[in-house]
Amino acid sequence: MQMNNIALVLAAVITMSPLTLVMANDVQAVAVEARVKSTPANQPEQSVQKTFTNLINAIEQNNYTQFISQGSPDFKKGLTKQIFTHVSEQLAPRLKKGYTSVFLTKLNQQGYQVYLWKLSFKDGSDDILARLSLKDAKIAGFWLN
């Protein structure tokens, strides 16, 4: 009896027409498209994008005051002007030659909203992963790896 069931399944697979397969693929494509459309656009909120752009511009212009202006008290206390200047001196020349930033995703981690971008440089040097951490609309951290 089991052998007959296997033969029946095999016969059904062999006799499926190309039209049946195309229809099955169309149904799968529609199901996948519906899931993709139901996800939010892969962009941060406008205010978050503006914060990120301000931080990058501050690094490019070596403007410490602008860089820490939206930071939490701990962020401001933890980032000295000397550390900021060191980072700016390394990155500003690369930023000035041109770069693109691509938003990657948003994460919720331990009460913080964490946003990730990929920075690619026109000079062909290594990409950087930028990580912006916000809490209560204040910058809690900004890392460039």
Image: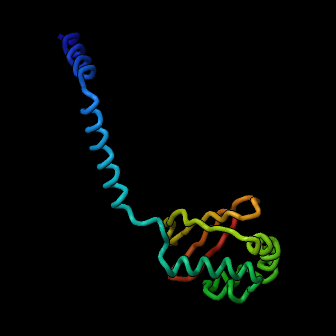
Q: Residue at x 74, y 72 (%)?
A: 95
Is 94 placed left or right of 108 in the picture? right
| Residue drawn where x is 24% and y is 25% of the image | 16
Residue at (25% x, 33% y) in the render = 19
User: Up-down: is 42 above or below 134?
Assistant: above
> Of 136 and 23, which appears nearest the observer?
23
Determine whether, in the image, residue 76 is placed left or right of residue 16: right
Which quadrant of the rendered structure holds the C terminus?
bottom right
Residue 23, image x, y percentages? 26, 38
Depth check, front residue: 85 or 7: 7
Seen as rendered, the residue at the extreme left is 1
Q: Is residue 69 above or below residue 96?
A: below
Q: Quadrant of the N terminus?
A: top left
What color scheme is it?
A: rainbow
- Looking at the picture, how far across and down is residue 10, in whole percent? 26, 17
The quarter of the picture where residue 36 lies is bottom left
Residue 74 position by quadrant: bottom right
Q: Nearer the viewer, residue 63 or 13?
A: 13
Residue 63 shown left or right of residue 136 in the figure: right
Instruction: Tally the marks.
Output: 0
Residue 134 figure quarter: bottom right
Q: Nearer the viewer, residue 40 or 24?
A: 24
Q: What percent of the width, then of the height, locates residue 82?
A: 82, 81
User: Who's the residue at 51% across and 71% down the image?
Assistant: 113
